[in-house]
Amino acid sequence: MKRLYLAVCLLFITSISFALNFGEIKTISRALARDPIPTNGSPRIAETFVSSYTNIGMNEIVANTWCLETSSSITITKYKREYTLPNDIISIKRVLLDNNLIKSTSISKKDVNDPNWEDNLSTGTPTTYYSDMGANVLGFDTYPSTTTDKILKITYIKQPIALTSDSAVPFDNQPRLIPYHYAICLFTASMICYQDNRATEGDRFYGMYVDRIKNMAASIGLSGDYYPSMSGNTNSR
């Protein structure tokens, strides 16, 4: 058993510098939860469950930290005010129209300011946009002009690509998120323990997982030139 834990520790140290793939995450998670796949026979928890837990953990981390973002470009169409958002969108972060920033508003605010705004057929470069996440669309306050308005660029928080093959790397293989791969192992290990009716062990791994994503959420948005204060409390005792 000591050898098993030593192997897990070594894999964790390695993961600080190198990405973990889907297969490695499942192996580490099983080792932590003391349910490795035996040479002969089957583990207590089926591989299909472990695969599902791994993907659930990855999705939950993205939803809680907004760590994964991308952009999508759409060509403006004449007499079209609303545009379909990408299917993997979680939240819009930034909207540019021909490299000019467009401010956000809400449908409810537009309803208050002008109850008949939807009947407005005027054309011109938009100054604001609204989003309807239920309908999965983004719309403008006016109809864009195809003469001057060409490309709509949306930067957004996205859902991760599902892990299916053992060689797949979490978080769409983004290098900056490599240090957070181990958090998925902790989540998956906790779910294995819960599935195996070992709630105390599950709680321990889940607590470690929660601490990790809290730290992740606090640091993921920091810029490269940010230096945390080291002054501490200057009040005398």
Image (cartoon, helix red, strand yellow):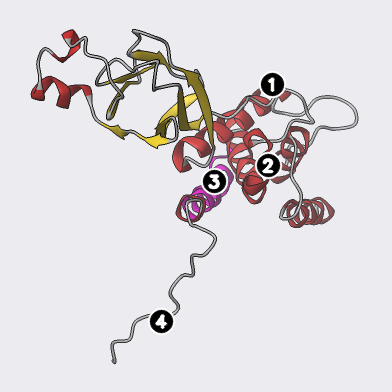
Distance from the alpha carbon under mark 4 to that under mark 3: 39 Å
Q: How many marks?
A: 4
Residue 203: give x, y in percent of width and height: 52, 45
Please indicate whether residue 36 sits to the left or right of residue 142 in the image: right
Q: Majority secondary structure of the magenta segment?
A: helix
Q: Is residue 50 magenta?
A: no
Q: Label 2, secondary structure: give it.
A: loop
Distance from the alpha carbon under mark 3 to that under mark 2: 11 Å
Q: Amino acid at mark 2?
A: Ala
Distance from the alpha carbon under mark 1 to that under mark 2: 16 Å
- Sequence-wise, the earlier of marks 1 and 2 is 2
Q: Say above or below: 22 vs 15.
A: above
Instruction: Nearest to the eye among marks 1 and 4: give it.
Output: 4
Residue 17: give x, y in percent of width and height: 75, 55
Label 4 sits on residue: 231
Instruction: Nearest to the eye among marks 3 and 2: give it.
Output: 2
Q: Label 4, secondary structure: give it.
A: loop
- Sequence-wise, the earlier of marks 4 and 2 is 2
Label 1 sits on residue: 48
Instruction: Nearest to the eye among marks 4 and 3: give it.
Output: 4
Q: Say above or below: 75 vs 183.
A: above
Q: Is residue 214 magenta?
A: yes
- Sequence-wise, the earlier of marks 1 and 4 is 1
Label 2 sits on residue: 33
- Residues shaded magenta: 198-215
Instruction: Nearest to the eye among marks 1 and 2: give it.
Output: 1
Please indicate whether residue 174 sits to the left or right of residue 237 in the image: right
